[in-house]
Image (tube, rainbow, N blue to C red):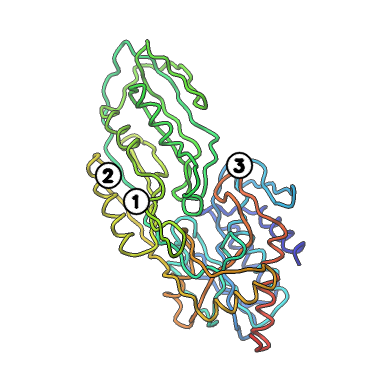
């Protein structure tokens, strides 16, 4: 079964499915599920439900991905027991879950498969779900660590803010440079926020502040839910200043009548003082209780834009983060334009989760119930689906998702598929 799943995943990699650009993948899934004998339903948000027989279980994954590097052009390859992609994100998050679901749908009746859209940009598909899932139990396949059955996750708040751009003349004794921070590791802003991963925007800002630079333009970060791996700026510094630092590319340039931002110092102060990273720890769950990620900064003809993603395990902390970020943005001259919030999924060790744990122990060995400081859809789906009683999440080992270093352990895919297949068999014959 493992080989079949990898083959299905390789086929998925040929189809573009960046968030907000999933139409071809959506049609592929509809066609494939029909070929497998399922009745297929779709809603206006692009969510897809495939049903065979009288379902006892619903499997669920999202089919969009975070596109980094050359993606959506993905060239998967195997190395040392892992699956990688050449110069791009792999999309095993959550394409491997999709591949597992398709393989099991080809083998079993009395099963539902729910494929949600645009999860990576705020759980948008799940939030707008308008499909009638009949199963009382849902197993999400979007987790990325073996040995854990997830029964809760952090909530998230996405903040987009801007300030009007005002410009002034650059003094004559200043030299223009293009300054670039690139090829940092980046990472998932929830799962990897505990790791010592440098934020490229903050690295750039601290360098520019140290050299009293005036900003002409600035652009950094890739996706709202990713730790920035690159950032660049065109700046002006006094001609007698030596602009150099290991790991930062500084290239002298010329530009006709350039103007700089009148509030360069204020902007750099904001970026350098931003509280990026873990802001609290939940000792019970052994995960961050709250965190924040300075995700993007960029300008257009009229405004300078900033995007921030903050997470918390409890509603109260999420509201505190929202208000504190609003205050900080206001203090620094930004206006909050858009704020999208997903509530936390409070940890719930349900009877169904305990069943899944029991099945998992046969393939994983020691297994625990846990929560993750990242977004998962079951909590939101529980609110949307009245017939759904219990849900939990498992998945194969995936490292460095949302980056060009993403990799997925191949044997882990087989173990997860075996867990799910064993669960399906037991639920269908009534022994579980």
**Residue at the disc numbered 3:** 70
Q: Nearer the viewer, mark 3 or mark 2?
A: 2
Dot 1 or dot 3: first in sequence order is 3
Residue 62 x, y percent position in the rendering: 55, 63
Q: On the rendered structure, is 409 left or right of 356?
A: right
**Residue at the disc numbered 1:** 159
> Could you say which is closer to the camera, residue 338 or residue 350?
350
> Could you say which is closer to the camera, residue 74 or residue 313?
313
The quarter of the displayed image where residue 254 is located: top left
Dot 1 or dot 2: first in sequence order is 1
Separation (CA) of disc 1 from disc 2: 10 Å
- Which part of the image, by quadrant, shows the C terminus? bottom right
Residue at 69% x, 75% y is 421
- Which part of the image, by quadrant, shows the N terminus? bottom right
| Placement of 16 over or under 203, stated as above or below | below
| Placement of 357 over or under 297, stated as above or below | below
Q: On the rendered structure, is 84 left or right of 156?
A: right
Dot 3 or dot 2: first in sequence order is 3
Helix, strand or loop at disc 1?
Answer: strand
The quarter of the displayed image where residue 59 is located: bottom right
> Could you say which is closer to the camera, residue 164 or residue 91?
91
Separation (CA) of disc 1 from disc 3: 27 Å
Verify CB contact (< 8 Å) between mark 1 and mark 2. yes
The quarter of the displayed image where residue 341 is located: bottom left
**Residue at the disc numbered 2:** 329
Helix, strand or loop at disc 3?
Answer: loop
Tally of numbered discs: 3
> Could you say which is closer to the camera, residue 49 or residue 206?
206
């Amino acid at each position: 079964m493992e080989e079949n799943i990898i083959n299905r995943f390789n086929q998925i990699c040929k189809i573009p499915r960046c968030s907000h650009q999933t139409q071809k993948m959506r049609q592929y899934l509809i066609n494939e599920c029909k070929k497998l004998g399922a009745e297929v339903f779709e809603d206006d948000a692009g969510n897809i439900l495939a049903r065979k027989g009288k379902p006892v279980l619903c499997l669920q994954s999202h089919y969009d991905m975070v596109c980094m590097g050359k993606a959506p052009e993905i060239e998967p390859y195997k190395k040392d027991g892992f699956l990688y992609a050449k110069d791009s994100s792999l999309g095993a998050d959550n394409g491997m879950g999709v591949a597992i679901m398709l393989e099991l749908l080809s083998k079993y009746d009395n099963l539902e498969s729910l494929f949600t859209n645009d999860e990576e940009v705020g759980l948008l598909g799940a939030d707008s779900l308008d499909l009638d899932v009949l199963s009382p139990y849902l197993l999400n396949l979007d987790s990325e660590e073996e040995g854990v059955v997830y029964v809760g996750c952090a909530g998230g708040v996405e903040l987009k803010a801007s300030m009007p751009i005002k410009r002034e003349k650059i003094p004559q004794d200043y030299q223009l440079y293009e300054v670039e921070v690139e090829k940092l590791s980046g990472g998932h802003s929830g799962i990897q926020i505990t790791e010592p991963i440098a934020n490229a925007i903050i690295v750039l800002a601290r360098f520019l502040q140290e050299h009293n630079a005036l900003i002409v333009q600035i652009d950094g970060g890739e996706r709202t839910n990713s730790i920035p791996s690159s950032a660049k700026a065109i700046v002006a510094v006094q001609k007698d200043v030596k602009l150099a630092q290991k790991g930062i590319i500084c290239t002298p340039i010329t530009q006709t009548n350039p103007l700089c931002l009148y509030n360069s110092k204020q902007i750099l102060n904001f970026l350098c003082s931003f509280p990026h990273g873990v802001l609290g720890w939940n000792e019970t769950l052994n995960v961050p209780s709250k965190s924040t990620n300075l995700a993007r900064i960029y300008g257009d003809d009229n405004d300078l834009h900033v995007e921030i993603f903050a997470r918390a395990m409890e509603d109260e902390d999420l509201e505190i983060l929202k208000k504190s970020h609003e205050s900080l943005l206001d203090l620094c001259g930004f206006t909050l334009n858009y704020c999208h919030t997903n509530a936390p999924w409070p940890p719930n060790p349900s009877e169904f989760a305990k069943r899944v744990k029991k099945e998992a122990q046969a393939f994983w060995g020691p297994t625990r119930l846990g929560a993750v400081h990242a977004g998962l859809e079951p909590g939101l789906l529980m609110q949307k689906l009245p017939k759904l009683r219990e849900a939990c999440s498992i998945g194969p080992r995936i490292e460095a998702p949302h980056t060009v270093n993403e990799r997925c352990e191949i044997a882990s895919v087989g173990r997860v598929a075996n867990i799910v297949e064993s669960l399906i068999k037991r639920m269908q014959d009534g022994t579980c």
